[in-house]
Image (cartoon, helix red, strand yellow):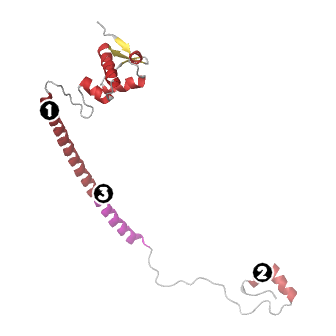
Amino acid sequence: MDKITIPLREIARETCITADQAKYWIKLLHIAPKIKGRVGYLESNEAAQLRTMAKLVAQGSNPKEAAAKITGITDENNIVVHEKNGIEDLQKALMLIVEANKATLEENRQIKEAIQLMQQEVKDQIFKLTEENRKLRLIFEPPQISKQIDVWKPKQSKINPLQSKNWLEKIYIKIFQPEKMRQFETQTLV
């Protein structure tokens, strides 16, 4: 016999809540709706849980607290606490928390050791690379020049080419034959 399924939007309309609130409350209640097409469906017992939660929230309860009251699951550690065996359940829950903390501490210790090993490997590689770099620099550095090289300069002529020229010839030489004046860069136009 098939179980009765009710569309989620219909339940939301009955309880006067929005569809988004209904989806959020379903997550808090740990209910997985059945999806057919684009519509989510809840079974009748799941719909009853959602209606009960709507009543609790309407009375002023927090949605997370209301979900914890209905399912008996706290959101923090997913620990089930029933009223009959409350102390035993709390002891079991504490033991689970202690075991989870021990496992986390051991995992953190292993991660820390792995990080320290990686840091040591990186330091060793950096040392090797700096030594190799120093050796390569010694090999490929250019040799030191012991004597100074003189750069070529044209001969300075002591004879001024404009000395025996008149002013028109001087202007002509300076304008149309400047190559003759290259040896006398500091000459002024007369």
Q: Is residue 87 visible?
A: yes
The residue type indicated by label 1 comes to: Lys
- Checking the image for residue 92, the label placed there is 1
For the residues carrying marks 1 and 3, which lies nearer the camera in this image? 1
- Checking the image for residue 30, the label placed there is none
Asked whether 46 or 158 is in front, the reply is: 46
Are dots 2 and 1 in contact, CB under 8 Å? no
Element assignment for label 2: helix
Q: Earlier in the sequence, mark 1 or mark 3?
A: 1
Q: Is residue 155 left or right of residue 39?
A: right
- Checking the image for residue 178, the label placed there is 2
Q: With respect to residue 36, does 155 lie above or below?
A: below
Q: Position of residue 49 (x, y in %)?
A: 30, 19
Residue at 30% over, 57% down:
122
Q: Earlier in the sequence, mark 2 or mark 1?
A: 1
For the residues carrying marks 3 and 2, which lies nearer the camera in this image? 3
Q: Is residue 26 visible?
A: no
Q: Is residue 161 left or right of residue 116?
A: right
Element assignment for label 1: helix
Asked whether 38 or 31 is in front, the reply is: 31
Quadrant holding the N terminus = top left
Residue at 47% over, 81% down:
145
Asked whether 37 or 76 is in front, the reply is: 76
- Checking the image for residue 122, the label placed there is 3
Q: Which of the 4 image quadrants contains residue 84?
A: top left
The residue type indicated by label 2 comes to: Pro
The residue type indicated by label 3 comes to: Val
Q: Main secondary structure of the magenta part?
A: helix
Q: Which residues are magenta?
A: 123-141
Q: CA distance from mark 3 to mark 2?
A: 67 Å
